[in-house]
Amino acid sequence: MKNSSVSPATAVHTAAVDEFVAVRHNLHQHPELSNAETETAQRIQQVFAPFNPDKTVSQLGGTGLAFIFEGEKVGPTTLIRCELDALPIQEINDLPYRSCHAGVSHKCGHDGHMAIVAALGAELAQHRPQRGRVICHFQPAEETGAGAIQVVEDAAFAALKPDYAFALHNLPGKPLGQVLCRPGTFNFASRGMVVRLSGKTSHAAHPEDGVSPAMAMCRIVEGLTALPSQIEGFSLVTVVHACLGEVAFGTAPGEAVVMATLRTPTNEAMNTLVEQACQLARQQAEVDGLNVSLDWEDVFGASVNTDDGYQRVMRACQTAGVEAVTMEQGFRWSEDFGKFTELCEGAMFALGSGESSPQLHNPDYDFPDALIPVGLSVFRELIRELNGISS
Ligand SMILES: [Zn+2]
Ligand SMILES: [Zn+2]
């Protein structure tokens, strides 16, 4: 880890940061899955209790939390969002703060994102915004794509509606502490497609008496994989699972399932891809006289940064002395933060977690603590410009 090369802002806040390293380790040790982050939310509430936020909204969109710090003058509402959830992955790191829940761990670094926003809360407690208000938001269920929708559709969200929203995600493979951002698509839209084919089983000695989905299943696997090459612009279809019949040599199959993940840089391109994928599955089922049902899971819209949001992130980095680069393309992976920037100005940015870091969702990933002061300094400067920070 190249801690020493991180932002000059680090030195100023060292004392406070140590406290939030401990907060991260505590959260890391007690991870919870999407929409089951009850204890994590309680821990965060305990951390924020001494910060005396002007308002606290709990159970926002499920287990979500919003801590509101108000300024005296009129001004914009700025929402800083982080995520509460961990992943169904068994941790293999031998850490003193190793996950104590078997098969569950913080392998996306959301523990680190939470520690940064908690540290921001500590600063806002001492230095209230001068105008408008700042909301420290802890969102449930990011990993399944369900959380942001739950939050924005919660009746309590109307009173919190932000003018600006920002979030960060740590990013292995990039220099530690480097910010990456871009205007427009930051994360692709994605969704899981489930195609269920149903025909009729028969004795394997008399397949002609049944209706087997085997050939249609193969054509759908091939056809879905080839779809992106037939559509304008970049898109991606990855077949992730296929299953045919039962493990029985005496029976010709009557059922099949194909699952694929669809990814596109925009929501419009996703609509086109979905239409084509559905048409393909229906056509191929019809050829063999099969029934077909289509379902969608883990639906994420594209996360799109506004121009103003992007420029604010770049300015904040410059003021904070954090190296920032503009990405040429958005990330293929998805994020549900786009639900917020559909409603207001804002941006998400990536924060490099080191070139030799294990990848996100790997069983040996661990959020680098050195990023806590860096993320904090960028959020601080975003807020300083939008809301002012009292001395
Ligand atoms: Zn993740
Ligand atoms: Zn994540």
Image: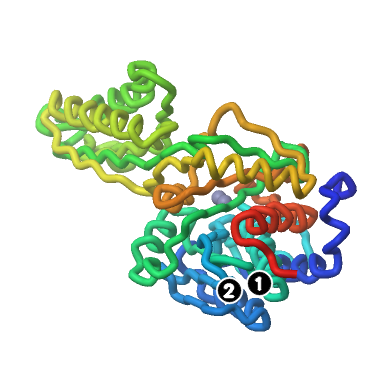
Q: Position of residue 301 (x, y in %)?
A: 39, 44
Alpha carbons under labels 2 and 1: distance apart: 9 Å
Taking the image as shown, residue 289 lies to the left or right of residue 157, namely left
Taking the image as shown, residue 241 lies to the left or right of residue 198, namely right
Tag 1 residue: 128
Counting residues from the N terminus, which is met first, the one under dot 2 or under dot 1?
Answer: 2
Tell me the quarter of the picture where residue 197 sits: top left
Farthest front residue in view = 73
Q: What secondary structure is marked by label 1?
A: loop
Marking on residue 72: 2
Q: How crowded is mark 2: few (under 14 residues within 10 Å), some or many (20 or more)?
A: few
Q: What secondary structure is marked by label 2?
A: loop
User: Is 195 situated above or below 384?
Assistant: above
Q: How crowded is mark 1: few (under 14 residues within 10 Å), some or many (20 or more)?
A: many
| Color scheme of the displayed model | rainbow
Observer able to see residue 1: no
